[in-house]
Image (tube, helix red, strand yellow):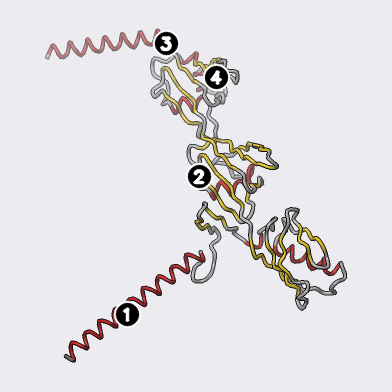
């Protein structure tokens, strides 16, 4: 009986210990997931947390975060409780400081706004040497929609306005099928405006690094255009203009694996459709282009590069094929 009671006690103690450990592990995991921080409390430089409506992009350096309308600021003036208050940044970018009045803090960093409030208290002769501590209590997220040829299209929640280059990077970057033009749609006062910017994967991003994306903007990365290569080529078909949205005639023919032996290379045709629906045709000498006598012309989306078949080369090829077939048949018969 005593031995049985001992085994039962050990079993009960083991079950209780396992339950406590499991509860502690579950609690620790929940705490880590809810805070989005590691046990050391550090946020990574590229911190991104998943939210219900998309991705929330946390600024890499909070010291560079700009105050925007809607932020709630906690302003504490040392040893002056009457001047300390929670201040909401208005649509005009101002906060109303007690005894001072409106102070414009929008587009300022936390340190800049804190210094500005201190100077305002001093210039208003309210305090001789004010000591102000400013903290952001509530942030206002910026919602941006990214569509088209990016790694993770969808909605992005940003704690502050970001550049177009940052938004594209946060959305996973451009895919291999992206073109060279990015459109940004912005709505203000019921009016929608669309701006286009040139950018390619091989670019360093200078063209779009200074373009700021604001709340409600839609970023569209269009798919690269298609150029059609037809006629006497090894692999006729349509080819994406993947070189940052650019493709010349030589590159298009290379993608088609070059011309065939029957090709009439002296008169290649480039057919282009005008905006009014009519077509215009350009002539191109393939040999001159290959020999470097002329620069390969740049193509546009929906262009058709047509390589005609030479009747003479075709006839000679057919004759050679017939002779080859007859020879093969003769050899086979002799055997």
* Viewer-side label of 1, 2: 1
* Viewer-side label of 3, 1: 1
Q: Residue at x 49, y 28 (%)?
A: 226
Give the mark, 2 or 3, whose residue is nearer the N terminus: 2
Give the mark, 1 or 2, whose residue is nearer the N terminus: 1
Q: Position of residue 18 (x, y in %)?
A: 32, 76
Give the mark, 3 or 4, whose residue is nearer the N terminus: 4
Residue with the mark numbered 1: 16
Task: Specify the label residue 272 is tagged with.
Answer: 4
Q: CA distance from mark 2 to mark 4?
A: 32 Å
Q: Residue at x 57, y 53 (%)?
A: 157
Residue with the mark numbered 2: 153
Nearer the observer, 181 or 72: 72
Find numbered disc 1 in the image and state the secondary structure of the residue it sits on. helix
Instruction: Confirm or deny contact between disc 1 and disc 2 (CB under 8 A).
Output: no
Residue with the mark numbered 3: 310
């Amino acid at each position: 009986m005593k031995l049985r009671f001992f085994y039962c006690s050990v079993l009960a103690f083991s079950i209780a210990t396992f339950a406590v450990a499991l509860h502690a592990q579950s609690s620790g995991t929940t705490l880590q997931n809810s805070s989005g921080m590691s046990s050391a409390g550090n946020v990574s430089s590229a911190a991104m947390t998943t939210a219900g409506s998309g991705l929330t992009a946390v600024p890499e350096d909070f010291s560079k975060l700009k105050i925007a309308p809607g932020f709630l600021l906690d302003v504490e003036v040392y040893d002056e409780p009457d001047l300390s208050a929670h201040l909401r940044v208005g649509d005009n970018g101002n906060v109303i400081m007690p005894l001072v009045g409106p102070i414009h803090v929008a587009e300022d960093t936390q340190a800049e706004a804190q210094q500005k409030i201190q100077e305002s208290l001093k210039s208003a002769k309210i305090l001789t040497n004010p000591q102000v501590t400013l903290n952001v209590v509530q942030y206002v997220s910026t919602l941006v929609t990214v569509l088209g040829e990016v790694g993770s299209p969808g909605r992005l929640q940003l704690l502050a306005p970001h550049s177009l280059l940052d938004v594209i990077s946060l959305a996973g970057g451009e895919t291999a099928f992206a073109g060279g033009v990015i459109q940004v749609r912005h709505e203000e006062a019921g009016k929608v405006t669309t701006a286009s910017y040139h950018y390619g994967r091989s670019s360093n991003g200078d063209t779009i690094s200074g373009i700021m994306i604001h709340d409600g903007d839609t970023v569209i990365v269009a798919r690269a255009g298609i150029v059609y290569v037809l006629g006497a080529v090894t692999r006729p078909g349509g080819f994406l203009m993947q070189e940052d949205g650019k493709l010349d005639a030589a590159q298009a023919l290379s993608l088609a694996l070059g011309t065939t032996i029957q090709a009439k290379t002296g008169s290649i045709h480039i057919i282009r459709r005008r905006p009014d629906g009519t077509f215009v045709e350009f002539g191109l000498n393939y040999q001159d282009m290959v020999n470097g006598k002329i620069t390969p012309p740049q193509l546009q989306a929906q262009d058709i590069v047509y390589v005609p078949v030479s009747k003479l080369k075709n006839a000679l090829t057919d004759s050679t094929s017939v002779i080859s077939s007859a020879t093969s048949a003769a050899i086979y018969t002799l055997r």
